[in-house]
Image (cartoon, rainbow, N blue to C red):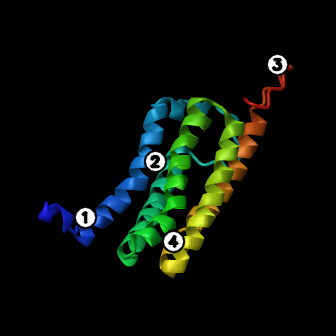
Amino acid sequence: MYIIKNFKPSKFLLLAISLAIPIGMSLLGSLAVGKNSLSLYGMLLKPGISPPMIVLRGIWILLCIFMGVSFYKIVVDIKDKYDLKSAIQPYFILLVLEFSWNIIFFGKQNRLAGIFIVLGMLFFTYLTYIRFKSVRKTSGYLLIPVFIWLIYLLILSAVVWYMNLNPVSGTFNIFT
C-alpha cells in the first residue's frame, strides 16, 4: 500500500496521459460514428470555406495536442487537489462536448444540436482558458487556437446546417 500511496508518475508519463486524453476522446467520438462520417461529410452541401475531412481531422489532432500540453502544464504546476479539480472541471466538460459533437452532428445528423454543442464548447474553452491562465499563462495561451478554431467550426456548422435544410422537398425541418 505504501508504494501505491506514494507513487508519483514521471513527467513523461504525465505528458503522455495528458496528450492521450484529448486525442483519445476525439478519436472515440469519430469511432462512435464510424466510417460513415467521411461519406456523410462528402454528401453534405458545404460552403467554399469548408476544408476536406482529412484537413479537419489533422487540425483537430493538432489542437488536441495543444489542449493536452496545456492540461499537462496545469497538472504539473498545481499541488493542491482542490485547486486542480477546480481548474480542470471545465476542461473535461469541453472534452465530453467534443466527443458528443461528432456523434450528434454526423451520427445523429442533427446539425442544429451540433451548433449548440459548439456553442457549449466555446463557453467551456473560454472558462478553461480563464482558469488555466490564472495558474500558468502558457496553458491559457495554448487554448487560443482552439477557441479560434471553434469560432470557425461554429460558422461552418451553421452554414452547413442552413445549406442542407432541404428546400427542394418543400418541407422545412429545423432539426435536420
Using the image, tell me which numbered label, if any, was put on residue 26: 2
The answer to which of marks 4 and 3 sits earlier in the sequence is 4
Query: Three-letter amino acid code at disc 1?
Result: Leu
- Rendered view: 118 above or below 111: below
The answer to which of marks 1 and 3 sits earlier in the sequence is 1
* Secondary-structure class at tag 2: helix
Q: CA distance from mark 1 to mark 2?
A: 20 Å
The answer to which of marks 1 and 2 sits earlier in the sequence is 1
Using the image, tell me which numbered label, if any, was put on residue 169: 3
The answer to which of marks 1 and 4 sits earlier in the sequence is 1
Determine which residue is flagged by label 1.
Answer: 13
Q: CA distance from mark 4 to mark 3?
A: 45 Å
Q: Residue at x 65, y 50 (%)?
A: 118
Q: Which numbered disc, 3 or 2, marks the residue closer to the eye?
A: 2
Query: Three-letter amino acid code at disc 4?
Result: Leu
Query: Three-letter amino acid code at disc 2?
Result: Ser
The answer to which of marks 3 and 2 sits earlier in the sequence is 2
Q: Position of residue 54 (x, y in %)?
A: 49, 46
Q: Residue at x 42, y 72 (%)?
A: 74
* Secondary-structure class at tag 4: loop
Q: Position of residue 149 (x, y in %)?
A: 61, 59
Q: CA distance from mark 3 to mark 2?
A: 35 Å
- Rendered view: 1 above or below 80: above
Query: Three-letter amino acid code at disc 3?
Result: Ser
Q: Please give left or right for residue 75 compared with residue 2 in the image.
A: right
Determine which residue is flagged by label 4.
Answer: 142
The answer to which of marks 2 and 4 sits earlier in the sequence is 2
Q: Which numbered disc, 4 or 3, marks the residue closer to the eye?
A: 4
- Sort mark 3 into few (<14), some (14-19) or many (20+) by Cα contacts within 10 Å: few
Q: CA distance from mark 2 to mark 4?
A: 18 Å
Of the pair 17 and 149, the residue shown nearer to us: 17
